[in-house]
Image: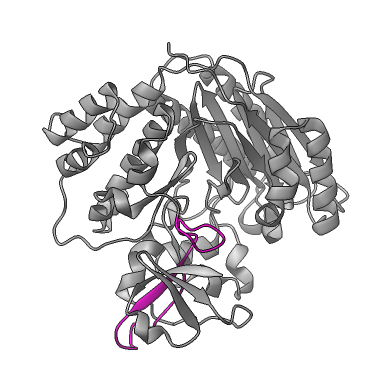
Amino acid sequence: MYYLMSGNCQASGRRYQIVAPAPLVVRDLEPEQPVESPAQLPALARPYQRLNLFRWAIPEIYTCSSALDGPPWVLLTNGPLFADGSPWPTLVQGWAGASYLQQLGWLIQVVRLWKPCLQEKVASSLLSPDNIGVLGWQIRLFYLATDSQPPSLSALGSAWLALQPLAPSLSQIARAVAAGELATADALLAALEAQAGRWQLTRPPDVYGITDPGRRDNNEDCFAYDSQGSFGIVCDGMGGHEAGEVASRMALESLKYDLAQLSTQQVPPLQLRQGLLQALHRANEQILEANRRQGRSKFRQMGTTVVAYLLSGRLLHIAHVGDSRIYLIDRHHCQQLTVDDDVANQEVSLARATSGAMLQISSSGNLTQALGVATASPLQPTVQTFVLPEECLVLLCSDGLCDGGLIERFWQSALLPLLDTDLIVGAKALVDLALEELGHDNITFILLKYAAQDERRR
């Protein structure tokens, strides 16, 4: 196993062998041995933890020194490295050979990271194109560098002007940012997404969904999707027989109506994201009200997790609450786009523990929020947008399919071939795989196959 290292590499001991100096890549010589789980993380680790919500772009802490053990060091997993330890191409290296939509998608991801990185005082990490790895549709940062002072957004525009060749529309945007004419990250994001919105689909994607009760007597999962692939929803109910399945069905019917309406609207991406948020809050209120009417409280509450997508041209808008997941699979790799709303990720995001340490705690998988479940904190759905520049699969699933790292372990054999074969046959084989490997829970998923499109603008 290969990892990125940051900090004092000499203090990490003999277990990790340096195989490349820049970026600093090490190989674990004892991968079968457990890793350290320090009680107090060094300051060097905290930004990675605090940006856990953006795990599709930010490496995770694998292990690190204790804050009390002298010069700090961290090992980073899920960085921009191939399986053999070699680094992904950098933004500079990949730029010239990329399509316009790939370039646009990369820049949109950088802008989405700007405000959270600025808050964690690591926004200067986004100013160096050599610190950004690219593969297919995706960016990932190699490292997070602490800001000596908060960088300006205009500095980001200046950095982009060094990317060559730069399409006229992107050059115009970069110059406007560098000159301070686009002065906020929100305005910059809107300008970039407006460019992506000019590309239309020349043919609808394939879509297919399926559910199986697994080894359970009843099925609390449900799903729905539009035959044209415009939207899809997967709900995983909780609360037991005649409760979880009621909650998931209530959420599904509410969301299906709202997403069908949103899918016909020609509005800016920001408005679509706001519509998704409002739809989730409406579904949440309906289930909360049902719990109140029936006198359900605490552990008797019924609720549901949810994942949903809305496809608008080349823009994929996704939303989730709970631990159902959305993955994006292309010919290069498989990436989980959502981060589970559970105790483990809450502790990681608060920089209290590493994800590896949380695996040892039995309660780490307990949900921190779900639709219809009253908690001390208000519901906070996560809504995100990605550009789809190339053929890929979008997988929405309940945890009956993704528990135990099943997707990560079998995506190459069970999902990647579906880019070239029939979705229905492949989906049924995926159910069989889940029954064989897991089967402890209901199994539900939707597969969206997004094919390569002709470059046609509106």
Is residue 29 shown to the viewer in this render? yes
Looking at this view, is 456 or 144 the one in front?
Answer: 456
In the picture, the quarter occupied by the C terminus is top left
Instruction: Give the mark count.
Output: 0
Relative to 79, residue 178 above or below: above
Q: Residue at x 45, y 18 (%)?
A: 199
- Residue 64: within the magenta? yes
In the picture, the quarter occupied by the N terminus is bottom right
Q: Residue at x 74, y 49 (%)?
A: 413
- Residue 18: within the magenta? no
Is residue 243 shown to the viewer in this render? no
Q: Residue at x 60, y 78 (%)?
A: 31
Q: Position of residue 426 (x, y in %)?
A: 79, 38
Looking at this view, is 448 or 417 the one in front?
Answer: 417
Q: Residue at x 56, y 48 (%)?
A: 335
Coloration mode: one colour
Overall secondary structure of the magenta section: loop
Q: Which segment did they paint magenta? A: 62-87
Q: Position of residue 327 (x, y in %)?
A: 60, 44
Q: Position of residue 138 (x, y in %)?
A: 46, 43
Relative to 40, residue 104 above or below: above
Looking at this view, is 249 or 94 the one in front?
Answer: 94
Horizontal side of 34 relative to 117 (left or right) equals right
